[in-house]
Structures are given as structure tokens and as C-alpha cells.
Image (cartoon, rainbow, N blue to C red):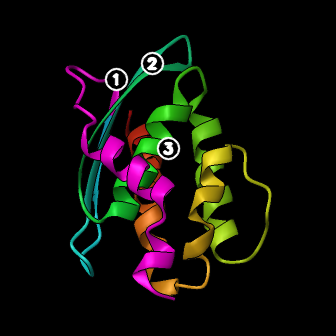
Amino acid sequence: MTDDALYQDRILELAKAGRALPRLEAPDATARVDNPICGDRVTLDFRLEDGAIVAVGAKVQGCALCQAAAAVIAENATGRTSGEVEAAGAAIAAYLAGEGDALPWPDLATFEPVRPMKSRRECVVLPFKAAARAFSES
């Protein structure tokens, strides 16, 4: 698969949004996850009220796929619980591995071109790992 097939317009749009995400001041949950193999680094911040996510912030130093996945979280997590975000992370990991097609958020299907590229799957999953760590450490 070529980079042209992988980096579709929607992935590039999401990556741009992911690069523009600001960090939150005084988040209720935050975590940083690094991928030492490729150098991607994701920090996600969450503000929570009554068990629901009310704001998401991020700093992504990584490839377009990593940036795009962080943007999908930011666009979809508000109003949801941490469990729903973690379930979305499990769903995209299974989807990318070819182990299922049920995706809770429509934008997750944007990452379909990554499925045959095992080495790039971690780029998409890394922001979800940061979210899971943030929730487990809060």
C-alpha cells in the first residue's frame, strides 16, 4: 500500500485537527504514552463532571495517523464516560487487527486503510492507550 492510499483526505483533515488540540489546564485525568519504536508521543487530558467527559485536550508529537486518532477521541469523547472511550479503543484495535467490524464512532472507519499495515496500527491505537492510562491513574 502506498502512502497516498493510507493518507486519505479525511485522515489528513483529522491530523490537522489533532495538531491544533490545546492541552487543558488542571485536567482531572491526564497521561502520556510513548512509542519508542517510532518516536510518537501522545499526552491526553480530560476534564470530567459527574462521570462524563466534558473537555479533551492533547499534545501529539507523532505521525498523521497518531494525530488523527487523537482528534477522533477529542471529537467523540465529550459527553461520554471513560468506559465508552476505552471500549472505542478496544474496538479500533480489534478492527485494525481484522478481528471485528463493529465500531462505535463513525470516524473510526476512516482508519480502514491501516488494517493491512501491521506496523502502522500502533500509531492509531496509541492515543487510546493514553486515554486508558489517564482514566486508570485518575
Residue 25 location (% of width, % of height): 20, 20
Quick one: label 2 or label 3, which is nearer the N terminus?
Answer: 2
In the rendered structure, the answer to whether residue 93 lies left or right of residue 137 reads: right
Q: Residue at x 68, y 68 (%)?
A: 94
* Residue at numbered disc 1: 28
Q: Would you say 50 lies left or right of 63 here?
A: right
Q: Which mark is residue 9?
A: none
3D distance between C-alphas at marks 1 and 3: 20 Å
Q: Which residues are magenta?
A: 1-29
Q: Residue furthest top?
A: 50
Circle 1: element type: loop
The image shows residue 74, relative to residue 41, as above or below, that is above
The residue where tag 2 is placed is 48
Query: Left of 65 or right of it: where is 113?
Result: right
**Who's the residue at 27% across and 81% down the image?**
37
Residue 72's disc is 3
Up-down: is 132 above or below 45?
Answer: below
- Mark 1 and mark 3 in contact? Answer it, CB < 8 Å: no
Quadrant in the picture for residue 120: bottom left
Residue ID at (22%, 31%): 23
Residue type, numbered disc 1: Asp
Is 118 part of what is drawn in magenta? no
Q: Are marks 2 and 1 in contact (CB under 8 Å)?
A: yes
Residue closer to the observer: 85 or 4: 4
Q: Is disc 2 placed on a helix, strand or loop?
A: strand
Q: Where, by quadrant of the figure, is residue 59 drawn?
A: top left
Quadrant of the rendered image containing residue 112: bottom right
The residue sitting at 24% across, 25% down in the picture is: 24
